Amino acid sequence: MPVRVHRPRTARGPRPLLVYFHGGGWITGGLEVVDRPLRRLANATGAVVVSVGYRLAPETQFPGPVEDCHTALRGVCARAAGWGADPGRLAVAGDSAGGNLAAAVCLMARDRGGPRIGAQILIYPVTAPAAGSPSPSYREHGENCLLTRDMMLLYWEHYAPGAAAAPHPYAAPLYADDLGGLPPALVLTAEYDPLRDEGEEYARRLRAAGGEAETVRHDGLIHGFFWAPEVFDAFGLALGDIARALDRHVPTR
């Protein structure tokens, strides 16, 4: 798998390691799409940010992409020292479908004995199938925003057909029977996003299972704002949220 390594401009000594999975509904996206925001993320947080180019659906359906991400996580940790990163201060992150993959990788790491993840940063994540979703945000913002309910139904059909009938926790983390023992989470959501409520519900489920999960809703924004740092002022606020979470759980100093 291809990866792209973003090193902070002023890094000295081993830095925290942040492994990032891009969004795109599991069928689009790639290293280039998130290149610009991840350059800024590395400089804002002081972490070495490694972006993973996992295989895409429909050619590779579930569980292929999430298995790719877990494999990549192990491989990146093994190579981290050569990039000036400390795998002992490890976090994962992702946006949208990439947030889904980041959450699933945390479940996989817990279930499979590692690697140990210190924090998960989930940016407007997908956590449950679109078909039959009870989330009010799907009813309120499922038609006229950048991301629509019909688009999400299509993405799920390409990635994990039948997931609504029998959701696997590595495909739909919200439906995991056990969310205990997972890393502290920061969940960023957008007001005008059909995925808003399922992301916030996932944070509530993590807290109910005894974990730590902070939710930050960015009012007035739509899905996808993290990909456009030049367009949305809130991108800078999101960077601040992420930097504080990383400094708390995988210290940069």
Image (tube, rainbow, N blue to C red):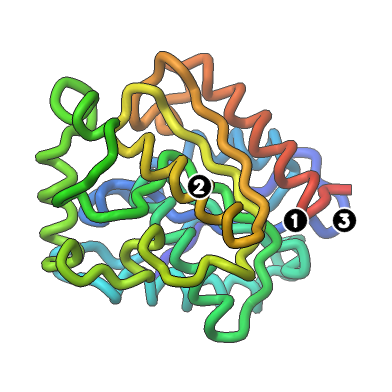
The x, y position of residue 167, in whole percent, is 26, 68
Q: What element carries label 3?
A: loop
Judged from the image, the secondary structure of the residue bearing numbered disc 2 is strand
For residue 146, what is the image quadrant? top left
- Name the residue type under label 3: Gly
What residue is shown at x 14% (from left), y 26% (from top)? Answer: 143
Alpha carbon separation for disc pair 1 and 3? 10 Å
The residue that mark 3 highlights is 13
Earlier in the chain: of badge 2 and badge 3, it is 3
Q: x, y (%) of residue 81? A: 75, 70
Give the CA separation, mark 2 to mark 1: 17 Å
Point 72% across, 46% down: residue: 246
Q: Is residue 8 above or below residue 161?
A: above
Determine if residue 200 is in view: yes
**Which residue in the protein does label 1 denote?**
16
Q: Nearer the viewer, residue 165 or 248?
A: 165
**Relative to 32, residue 63 above or below:** below
**Where does residue 101 sit, x and y in percent of width and height?**
41, 60
Disc 3: CA contacts within 10 A as few (<14), some (14-19) or many (>=20): few
Residue that label 2 marks: 122
Task: Specify the quadrant that holds the N terminus.
Answer: bottom left
Q: Residue at x 45, y 55 (%)?
A: 21
Q: Which of marks 2 and 3 is in front?
A: 2
Earlier sequence position, callout 2 versus callout 1: 1
Within 10 Å of the Cα at label 2, are there few (<14), some (14-19), or many (20+) other Cα atoms?
A: many
Q: Does the residue at mark 1 contact the one at mark 3 (Cβ under 8 Å)?
A: no
